Image: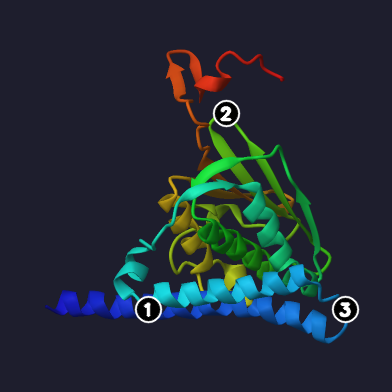
Amino acid sequence: MADDVNRVEQARHRLAADVAHELRTPPASLQAGLEELRDGYAEAPAERLASLHDQTLRLGRVVDDLGKPAEAESARLSLHLTEVDLTAPAVAAMAEREAELRTAGMTVRIVPGPAPLPVRADADRLHQTLGNLLSNTARHCRPGDTVTATTSATPIEALVEVADTGPGIPAEEHPHVFDRLWRGARARSAGGSGIGLAVVKELVSAHGGTVTADSGPGGGTRTTLRLPRAAPHGSRLVSGPGVEPRLASEANTPRGI
């Protein structure tokens, strides 16, 4: 019974941390965007207002999900899967976080790869995932750093890479980057909660994908999100001994085309 009580208490603490983190990120983006409009640093076209409105809708969805403690604790949040062009949520997330990143003194770049990059995914969850990555970048980088989002593809995967020129992650901390409630030395000094990247990993895993992060000896961090590509209608994945897995529709396509 004592063990059960202890587990329940730990779950409550984790849920409180989840709620605090997930409710903090969308308002921060909204605040940065609205302050730009209020102070006259940006125009207020319909597209910009629609983007801010979308943020409020996603905030409402986060509140709904976190209102279900069992789902929040197990990270089995509801997924509404459709065929999504991965480039679209990557570009949208970058646009929505651009004000936040610029406010942190960073230069923002996006390098879209070949389109479309179809994946079976929940578009809102991809926004949430990429938004968490970019907010984490804004929190831990320095004024003058650059963040670049790049989309690309392999025969069986669609990728989004978020790379920055920040101070990087010490090598001894790499195995723990996506651990729940774990914070490195720089995260503790920056006020991180140890939730954001754990949520990223949980959401990517729920989509059948993977996420990794690494830093070079000279600094900078590269986070790579990989999702299975959606097979075109009538296609299937082929593989075999000595054969690189690829879509059947690509099996007879010469390399380099």
Residue 122, image x, y percentages: 49, 55
113 sits to left or right of 170: right
Mark 1 Cα within 10 Å, few/some/many (few <14, many 20+)? few
Residue 89, image x, y percentages: 63, 55
The amino acid at mark 3 is Tyr
Determine whether 23 is above or below 78 in the image. below
Tag shown at residue 41: 3
Q: Earlier in the sequence, mark 2 or mark 1?
A: 1
Secondary structure type for disc 2: loop
Mark 2 Cα within 10 Å, few/some/many (few <14, many 20+)? some
Proximity of marks 3 and 2: CB atoms separated by less than 8 Å: no
Residue 61, image x, y percentages: 48, 72
The amino acid at mark 2 is Pro
Give the image quarter of residue 38: bottom right
For the point 85% across and 75% down, which residue is it? 43
Q: What is the residue that sits farthest to the bottom in this orientation? A: 38
What residue sits right under mark 1 in the picture? 67
What residue sits right under mark 2 in the picture? 155
Q: Earlier in the sequence, mark 3 or mark 2?
A: 3
For the point 66% across and 39% down, which residue is it? 152
